[in-house]
Amino acid sequence: MAYQSVELKDSISIKKIVSVHYFQYMSDFSFPGESHNFWELICVDRGEIDAIAGDRRLTLKKGNILFHKPNEFHNVLTNGRVSPSLVVIGFECHSECMKAFEDQLMNIQDTEKELLAQIIIEARNTFSGRLDDPYQEQLIFLEPSASFGSEQLISHYLEQIMIHLYRRYFSYSLPVNTHRLLPSEAGSGNDTFNRIVRYMQEHISEQLTIERICKDNLVGRSQLQKIFRDAQKCGVIQFFSRMKIDTAKQMIRDNQMNLTQISDRLGYTSIHYFSRQFKKITSMAPSEYATSIRLLSEKPV
């Protein structure tokens, strides 16, 4: 066979790091504020702060992440009660998609927390000096580096954080695990299956019955059931229920609506029925799923 390669394109490329900090502010810490020509992310791991971003003042709590765009004046203000722990990373990135992160306050989940922890670990292996010094203005490389490939991993982990956040907040799509369409084959039921899956996606906020699906798609009941058993090893209503819950999980991750609003949006008769269906399929209640974010763990270097 004549194998041919394909070029992999970078959606986000980060080649320069300016700062990596993980520290605990004193409860009465004050900072005069600054602006600079690179991006800076700030993530609250404990407590809360007020952040000045241009002409806005925002309250950041545990799990919040904020991106300061280049040349934006910004500042951190503590509340005098709790000593907050923060992750702050300065970096250069000129990818077009970074415009989406301007003026955005977001929440991180397990994936981003673990990636931030890995960045801190690799930074310890790469740079000298203390990562808990908020006034450190230049990263100095260790000679030799304590770990092979640590510089590359820092950029890759940071790029992954940006990709995960972008997908969650700016490129909404239905999860693909139960919605994957099948390749069309002559004489097979794949065309009908794909057509009905698209129909379900368009009616995800409704309560569909087998009778209505058959009527709207001009297919017999037994044929419909056989198509879904062959394609997904389950019944058509069971498939639609999983599709609804997958969509609910995506909406919870988006953090734009509360659970009652999500239940209403997806056509459930009550929040209690929605919760039962959610737990039946995922083995956890919606509220458990919404708060299942692990703490940033301290790992040995």
Image (spheres, grey):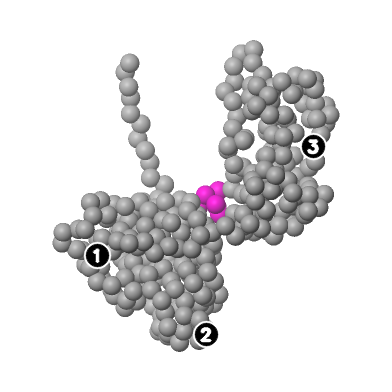
- The structure residue drawn at horizontal position 67% and vertical position 54%, both measured from the top left corner, is 286
Q: Name the element at disc 1.
A: strand
Residue assigned mark 1? 127
Q: In which quarter of the image is residue 23?
A: bottom left
Inspect this view and state whether residue 276 appears: yes
Residue assigned mark 2? 81
Quick one: quadrant of the N terminus?
A: top left
Q: Disc 1 and disc 2: Cα gap in Å?
A: 32 Å
162, 115: nearer the viewer: 115
First along the sequence among labels 2 and 3 = 2
Quick one: quadrant of the C terminus?
A: bottom left
- Asked if disc 1 and disc 2 are in contact, CB closer than 8 Å, the reply is no
- The structure residue drawn at horizontal position 37% and vertical position 70%, both measured from the top left corner, is 22
Which kind of residue does numbered mark 3 sit on? Leu
- Asked if disc 2 and disc 3 are in contact, CB closer than 8 Å, the reply is no
- The structure residue drawn at horizontal position 47% and vertical position 68%, both measured from the top left corner, is 45
Magenta part of the protein: which range? Answer: 166-171
Q: Disc 2 and disc 3: Cα gap in Å?
A: 52 Å
